[in-house]
């Protein structure tokens, strides 16, 4: 019996028994892991770990993102910038973790390239806040009307640039998702 026949039988059994969707997914993931090379398993584990770490960086309780937002609410620009420094360290760690996986097949290398592009786009988007915070600081702390006006104008230009960074994230995410789906 080959792997495809085993997978087909498992799928039929799962639909007959009506196993919970998440358990079915885990079984298929386990089967696919058992039928892959060590490099593939390692890369899959790194990508899963990175997915969780990205969520922690951006959405986790006491995350750098949360610290940045709370600092901005309280106009503490120095702490907000330090939070971005922490994000940079953590994004670099995500990228380095992918880059340090062993050389694999052509498909693995393409997936690695797309994963690195995605996490790099995320990094650029979130580190771009440094420029925004600098202009916010000028607009809030300057007593000179001309400086405040220039800072506010600059914020509008920065928002247009940030929109391009969001687009880069969306594009790289789409390519990464498709590579990962076919992996």
Image (cartoon, rainbow, N blue to C red):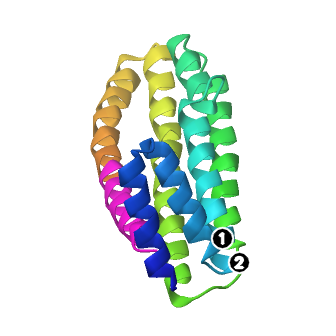
Mark 1, residue position: 41
Badge 2: residue crowd in 10 Å (few <14, some 14–19, many ≥20): few
Front residue (pair 100, 179): 179
The question of residue 178 being in magenta is answered with yes
Give how far across and how far down residue 36 sits, in percent: 61, 78
Judged left or right of residue 41, residue 11 is: left
Q: Which residue is drawn at 59% across and 18% down?
A: 71
Mark 2, residue position: 38
Contact (CB < 8 A) between labels 2 and 1? Answer: yes
- The answer to whether residue 141 is above or below residue 47 is above
Q: What secondary structure characterizes most of the magenta part?
A: helix
- The answer to whether residue 65 is above or below residue 109 is above
Secondary structure of residue under mark 1: helix
Specify whether residue 110 is in view: no
State the separation of the CA atoms marked 2 and 1.
Answer: 5 Å
Give how far across and how far down residue 162 sits, in percent: 35, 45
The question of residue 148 being in magenta is answered with no
Q: In which quarter of the image is residue 96?
A: bottom right
């Amino acid at each position: 019996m080959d792997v495809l026949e085993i997978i087909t039988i498992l799928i039929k059994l799962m639909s007959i028994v009506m196993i919970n969707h998440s358990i079915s997914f885990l079984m298929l993931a386990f089967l696919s892991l058992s039928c892959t090379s060590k490099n593939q398993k390692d890369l899959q584990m790194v990508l899963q770990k990175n997915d969780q770490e990205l969520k922690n960086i951006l959405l986790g309780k006491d995350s750098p993102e949360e610290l940045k937002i709370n600092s901005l609410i309280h106009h503490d620009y120095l702490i907000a910038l330090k939070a971005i420094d922490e994000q940079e360290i953590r994004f670099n760690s995500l990228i380095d973790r992918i880059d340090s996986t062993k050389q694999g097949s052509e498909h693995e290398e393409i997936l690695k390239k797309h994963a690195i592009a995605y996490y790099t786009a995320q990094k650029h988007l979130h580190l771009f806040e440094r420029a925004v915070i600098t202009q916010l600081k000028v607009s809030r702390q300057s007593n000179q009307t001309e400086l405040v006006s220039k800072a506010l104008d600059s914020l509008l230009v920065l928002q247009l640039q940030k929109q391009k960074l969001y687009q880069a994230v969306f594009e790289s995410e789409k390519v990464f998702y498709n590579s990962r789906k076919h992996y």
